Image (cartoon, helix red, strand yellow):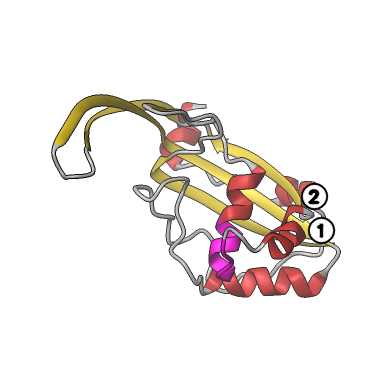
């Protein structure tokens, strides 16, 4: 098995799987579907390319929480308009983010060619990558410069990797 490790760290992240209307929640860690979406964006896949996406859904997945982060609630005032351009109403939306969180995500497969293709795409993504929302761009060091996929499984890769939490967080724990 070949495994790719990605460090996801940023001032804000949002991993929503249950967001409706004016309330946009976040999970405490990235979901497999979010990471598959990120990989698909890096590879230039479109949402309707189900066959390609099905191949990515078969990947092994694990996530390690190195720095838990805190929930941040942001409210915004949104305005909806009629089709003729007139203002219909304004309303408050609540958006939740994780602040100062650090995760290490492991993606693995027995298909070494697929892992190499994913790794190359992550180094030179087709679309911009985000930490859940467009307002949360990915950190520049999500892959180290000369990163090569490991020959270990996803769990073994995570357990053998050094902790990636910030120094101030490590002193606190």
Q: State left or right for residue 110 relative to residue 138.
A: right
2 and 1 marks in contact (CB < 8 Å): yes
Q: Residue at x 55, y 70 (%)?
A: 44
Prevailing SS of the magenta stretch: helix
Q: Is residue 94 among what the camera can see?
A: yes
Instruction: Residue 38: name its quadrant.
Output: bottom right
| In magenta segment, residue 27 | no
Which mark, residue 25?
none
How crowded pointer 1 is (Cα within 10 Å; few <14, some 14-19, many 20+) is rated as some
User: Residue 100 versus residue 166: which sits nearer the camera?
Assistant: 100
What residue sits 71% from the left and 67% below the top? 149
Mark on residue 156?
2
In the rendered structure, find residue 152 and report the number of the disc placed on it: 1
Residue 43 magenta-drawn?
A: yes
**Position of residue 7 measured from the top left corner of the image (x, y, whole percent):** 55, 52
Distance Cα–Cα, label 2 vs label 1: 6 Å
Q: What range is drawn magenta here?
A: 38-46
Towards the viewer: 137 or 44:
44
């Amino acid at each position: 098995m070949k495994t790719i490790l990605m460090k996801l760290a940023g001032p804000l992240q949002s991993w929503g799987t249950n967001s409706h209307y004016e309330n946009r929640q976040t999970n405490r860690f990235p979901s497999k579907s979010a990471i598959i979406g990120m990989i698909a964006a890096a590879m230039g896949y479109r949402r309707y390319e189900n066959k390609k996406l099905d191949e990515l859904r078969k990947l092994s997945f694990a996530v390690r929480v190195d720095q838990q982060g805190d929930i941040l609630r942001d409210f915004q005032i949104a305005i909806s308009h009629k089709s003729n351009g007139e203002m219909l109403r304004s309303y408050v939306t609540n958006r939740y983010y994780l602040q100062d969180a650090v995760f290490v995500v492991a993606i693995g497969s027995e298909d070494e060619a697929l892992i190499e293709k994913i790794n190359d795409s992550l180094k030179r993504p087709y679309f911009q990558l985000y930490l859940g929302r467009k307002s949360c761009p990915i950190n520049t060091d999500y892959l180290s410069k000369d990163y090569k996929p490991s020959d270990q499984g996803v769990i073994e890769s995570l357990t053998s990797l050094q902790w990636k939490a910030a120094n101030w967080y490590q002193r606190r724990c």
